[in-house]
Amino acid sequence: MFDKIILAPYYLALKARHFCYDHGIRKVSTAEVPTICVGNITAGGTGKTPHTEMILRSLLRSDDWAYRNIAVLSRGHKRNSGGFQIVEAEGKVKEYGDEPLQIKKKFRSITVAVDRHRVKGCELLVHPEKIATCRRARKCSDKQIPPTDLVVLDDAFQYRALRAYFNILLVDYSRPINKDMLLPFGRLRDLPERLLKGDILIVSKCPHYLTDEERIKWSKTLGLKDYDPETCTGIDHKGNSKVLLFTTINYKHLTPVYEEADPRFAYSQKLILFTGIAKDTPLRMYLSDEHRIISSFKFADHHNYTKSDIRRIMRVVENNPTSVVATTEKDCQRILDLGELPDKLKQRLFYVPIEVDFLTDREREIFETVLTDMLRKFNPNY
């Protein structure tokens, strides 16, 4: 009861904010091209960036979108630059943020941009001829991009000034929203009922197998009834059909961060781990299958590493000369910004690539069908 009293002002502020956008008191814009929002209602940890990458792979496999101009628009969390920027693969995290840079390095043919003002960011992606004269883009180094046909919005569900054409919302399997609370007592940054605004709901970070009974139980925690595991659909309280899918994380083999790395370290039994992500428990469990984690450094999400951090890690390395040092794919981007590192660290520093995928081929097929059908409604010629 005490928690609810303390959280009441935050709850009422969220209700008032959404009321203003839902009833036209505050302006809501839409982009000229289809927009797909990948979001959640919690503060980090659901895997938005890996799911954004999964969506890009699905689009690039499709007949409708493989040869069209696709863009990703992100806020660019913790970047030092301002305004609108086109992400270059050779750039630095401080310019764009770690996640946009990670996406660009994986998808060189995709335009990746950062801008806190998503409405203006979409406008510039659709009309790149405006970049040269727009004040928000005056420091943008790349002004020659093709006009965008579709924009994937990374973490824009709470950005109510832009209404996405299609919302894909994520929930962490280990943290059901019916057992969570609003910040700061929990991880919720938005009202739980907002989850049903999603066109596709995805429970992320699941075990590699779930029974139909477990899926049905999950659907009930999200406010859906009559969930059919075969069609992956349930009914919300307004009688609308909702698609509910389940994904898991697939970790890949240790990959060198630097060319100087000695591949033999990847097979070391001892491992030193450092991470700057919201939740590293699944990663530690995966690495523990092949290695004994002798030391672990956990930093805040999107942590900007310093020489002092490297010295702390090196002290453990010096005491364990045969150990491998591992980090996440996201952290790898920030480490590369530091410049020169000790040779001993370069030789044994690896990252763990990850991909998300659906638990079944049937779910993947449903996802791609629903996504394609919705985009064709926007423009039947696609």
Image: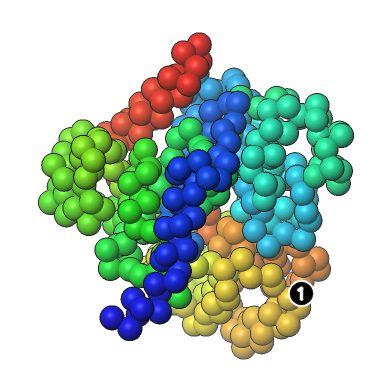
Tell me residue 283's x, y (percent): 44, 65
In this rendering, the answer to whether 282 lies above or below 1 is: above
Question: Eyeballing the image, is 321 above or below 11?
Answer: below
Residue kind at label 1, given as amino acid type: Pro
Pick the front one: 339 or 167: 167
Foreground pick, 294 / 174: 174
* Residue at x 52% of width, y 79% of height: 296
**Image quarter for residue 93?**
bottom right
In the displayed structure, does residue 203 sit left or right of residue 257?
A: left
In the picture of the structure, the residue carrying the numbered disc 1 is 342
Q: Specify whether residue 289 is in view.
A: yes
Task: Check the image and name the residue furthest to the front.
Answer: 25
Q: Nearer the viewer, residue 103 or 355?
A: 103
Q: Quadrant of residue 3?
A: bottom left
Residue 45 visible? The answer is: no
Q: Position of residue 154 (x, y in %)?
A: 55, 46
